[in-house]
Amino acid sequence: MTTGTTHIDIRPLNSTVTAIVIEGNVTSASEAPLMEAYMAASAEGARTIVLDFSGLDYMNSGGIGLLVTLLVRVQRQGQRLTACGLSDHYREILSLTRLDEAIAIYPSEADVLATVS
Amino acid sequence: MHEMDETTVVETTERPPTTSGPELAANSSGPEGRGGDRADSNWSRPVDRLAIGAVPSSAININVDGRRLVGPVQGFGQLWQKRYEVRLAGADVTPEAVIATWKAEFGSFWPKGSRFYGPVTSLAPGEVALLNLDMPGRQTLSTGVMVIYADDESFTFMTPEGHPFAAWITFSAMLQEGVTTLRIEVLLRANDPLYEVGMSLGGHKQENDFWVATLHNLAARFGVDAQATAEQTCVDRRRQWNHAGNLRHNAAIRSGLYRMTHPRIWFGHPDAT
């Protein structure tokens, strides 16, 4: 799923954990591909969604707003939203915006799997 | 003005990327690598507690110093997404020029009665501004905002504990079909149960009227007499009862108590104290 400078794929990590792999920029223009990826992950039975930001180039305030919208949908479905692969800078931004209180942050997908299992 | 369900949210945001200011900012600057200079300078550094420096003598500052920032995750009420927009048809002005003016003269575009005590120069990431908001019954609600993000085509505020909203507010300008368009996008939850009641009893209308009037005033600054549009969508109807305790920070209650214990301001401006 690609739009503008955003490319988003999903990668099942096991039967209940699926990574949404994000490359490029995350802005409010990324809403359609991100939500499509989330719906695809849910359709495969994911209970834990991992946002893999290893390929993130840039995220603005519109992108942060998008994460809240996704968080609401995930919580409504009784799923869990986590993130990994964030640079120190974007870890700070999730701390600044206090999104890290609702989205658990891990260094890597392997760390998410270790915690979930 | 209308209320919609979440399905509509997705539909309304499936616009071409060129119709949104922050997207333009992200795409027009070119790639600079992960966590590069562009990202570093546009975002504020994290803060644990807000601290405000010198305060104008006319400002009431009782609900900002020492407060934490709160966003939609920490709020109590329903989650709302609001958008206000006005087109500067016929004005020969770029989005960057509008944003520069907006940052520099932010409070001057507010409707009469409320005061914005921002930095002397221009709004920049990390800066904290005091707000003294006009309320019914000659009450003044003292609160503030922090600039968490700013670039050439947009800037974003986040609110402190006690503010009526736990919110992010983004102000942006972009070209739409060759016309510079100004937009305010708000993602908010009422901060506590009292504010949530207030929102349902006219608070939403008051908020919408405020920003529509602000955009009208800003358009007039560029010689355009235009009516702004307003849309609002309820993204999450659930209330976060685990955050009902936010009531202890309620800036309206604290401002009212301050007024009761400082009777000189009954007869005039807060600087009478």
Image (spheres, rainbow, N blue to C red):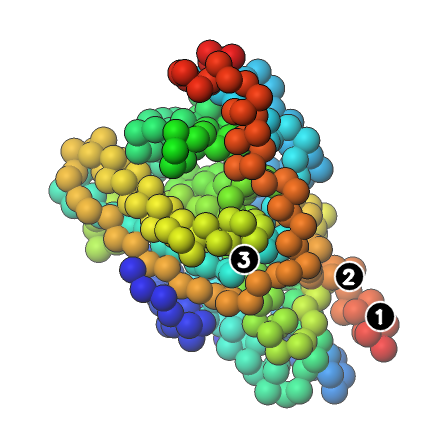
Indicate the secondary structure of the residue bearing disc 2: strand
Q: Nearer the viewer, residue A77 or B10?
A: A77
* Left or right relative to B93: residue A48: right
The reply to whether the C-beta atoms of the residues labelled 1 and 3 are less than 8 Å apart is no
The reply to whether the C-beta atoms of the residues labelled 2 and 3 are less than 8 Å apart is no
Indicate the secondary structure of the residue bearing disc 3: loop
* Left or right relative to A13: residue B203: left
Mark 3: few, some, or many residues within 10 Å (few <14, many ≥20)? many
Where residue B144 sits in the image (x, y, percent)? 53, 33
Q: Chain of mark 1?
A: A
Mark 2 = which residue?
A: A106
* Left or right relative to B271: residue A111: right
In this rendering, the answer to whether A114 lies above or below B100 is below
Q: Residue at x 33, y 33 (%)?
A: B110
Indicate the secondary structure of the residue bearing disc 1: helix
Q: Quadrant of the N terminus of chain B?
A: bottom left
Mark 1 = which residue?
A: A115
Taking the image as drawn, is residue B230 in sight? yes
Q: Chain of mark 2?
A: A
Q: Residue at x 16, y 38 (%)?
A: B224
Q: Earlier in the sequence, mark 1 or mark 2?
A: 2
Q: Residue at x 39, y 29 (%)?
A: B138
Q: Residue at x 45, y 29 (%)?
A: B140
Mark 3 = which residue?
A: B77
Identity of the amino acid at label 2?
Answer: Tyr
Where residue B208 sits in the image (x, y, percent)? 34, 49
In this rendering, the answer to whether B116 lies above or below B82 is above
* Left or right relative to B194: residue A53: right
Distance from disc 2 to disc 3, alpha carbons, whole Å, reads 29 Å
Where residue A2 sits in the image (x, y, percent)? 48, 71
